[in-house]
Structure formats: C-alpha cells, structure tokens
Image (cartoon, grey):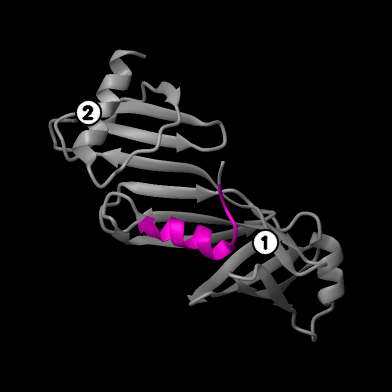
Amino acid sequence: MKKFSTLQELWSYCLFCPLCQDITRDITVAAGPFHVVIVTYQSKDNEFLKIETVVKMPKQRYSVNYYIDCVKNVFTISVPKTLPNNEESVTKAFSSTFFLSLLSSCHVCANTSVNSADVEIDLLSKKISNFEVVMEGIYLFEQKNKYHLTLNHKSDELLVSKCFEDDSGRIIDDNKVVNLPLTYFDFSKPKKVINRIRTFLVFS
C-alpha cells in the first residue's frame, strides 16, 4: 500500500497529475456506508475540509456536517438539533462503520486517476485514520505504442494492457491484461516509461 501520515498528504497526492506534472486533478469525496450516507457538498480551504452529508435512516433523513482538520486528523460534527435524531444517536449508529474515500481524475489530460482506501472515521474519538492509495489508472497515449496502466497498491501489481486507435480516431483498450510486479515510474518522461513497459512485456 502507498501510505501517508495525514489526510492532507493523501489529498495533495490525489491532486497531482504525474503526466501533466501539475496540480490538475479534481477530487470527489464519497462517504459510506454507501446505502446510508450521501455527500451533498464538499469544500476545502487550506487544510480544512467541510463535508455536508445526508444520512438515510429508517423512516427519516437528516443532515450531518463534518469539519475536518486534514493536518491534525481530527474533526467536529454538526447535527441539526431540531430533528429527532441527535449527535449521540448518529455516533452510536456509525462509530464502527462510517468512512470517507477520495476519487480523483485529471481535468486537463483526462488520462490519470486515483482511488484511495477507506479513510476511517471514529465518531467517538473524533479522529480519522488510514490514509492510503489503493489504485491508480494511467493512460499513455503520446507515443505510437499506447498503454493502459493500473497500479494496484493493494496487491503490489502493475496491470498493463495495450491500446489502439480505431478508424474513427478513438482510443480502444484491448483489455488483454498482463500482470507484472508493481513498478514506480517517472511519468515526466513518458517515452522512457513506454520503453520500459515494452521491455517488461517482452520478458513477461
């Protein structure tokens, strides 16, 4: 696993596109359990992240807002007091199951993405933990030989499939995946990365 010490470090990693070599990725925050919690709004100001959610309980719905210090890995929670369920009931319901996850993709090249592991939320201690990247997707289209790479940090695997351009100019993934040991590349030099991948495939 690719691990970080704080949510801020994980957030910064998810923002940076290795192909564009710039902070060009957009992050979407998801929350779970997915059948219970829906994120309706997110905003981040420096190290502070605000997440507004709707919690679906039997026969009712209500809002729960989280204010997270991404450097200190702590948060506060706000639950409207006028609704039947208060903060104490929310804590009892989700103290062992509530989590967040980060999903990011590049809005410039559209060729890189990141999925984080579940960031664990402890509603009793008001602390968050488990800052890891599970998977990254990267498409290398700039050279004649085109590839789709999946870096699976959970299983320490590099999944490689070839891509080709059809008659209409669309890039198609052939989905014939070759499993290799996880390798970290310098994506600022995509031509060298492709040459290494071609070598790996020859000897795989």
Q: CA distance from mark 1 to mark 2?
A: 45 Å
Residue at the spot 30% in from the left edge and 60% down from the top edge: 22
Q: Amino acid at mark 2?
A: Asn
**Residue 14 percent across, percent down from the top left:** 44, 56
Residue 48 in the image: x percent, y percent? Answer: 56, 76
Q: Position of residue 46 (x, y in %)?
A: 48, 77
Where 31 falls versus 153 (above or below)?
Answer: below
Magenta region, residue range: 3-16
- The amino acid at mark 1 is Val
Q: Residue at x 28, y 49 (%)?
A: 19
Which residue position holds label 2? 195
Q: Residues within 10 Å of mark 2 (few under 14, many from 20)?
A: few
Residue visible at 83% across and 67% down in the picture: 124
Seen as rendered, the residue at the extreme top is 203
* Image point (83%, 62%), residue name: 93
As helix, strand or loop, the secondary structure at mark 1 comes to strand
Q: Quadrant of the N terminus?
A: top right
- Provide the residue designation for mark 1: 37
Vertical comparison of 149 with 133: above or below: above
Q: For the view shown, which residue lies furthest in the bottom direction?
A: 82
Indicate whether residue 7 is drawn in magenta: yes
- Helix, strand or loop under label 2: helix
- Is residue 129 in view? yes
Q: Is residue 163 visible?
A: no
Majority secondary structure of the magenta segment? helix
Above-or-below relation of 195 to 138: above
Side of 41 relative to 179 (left or right)? right
Would residue 7 appear left or right of 74 to someone viewing this image? left
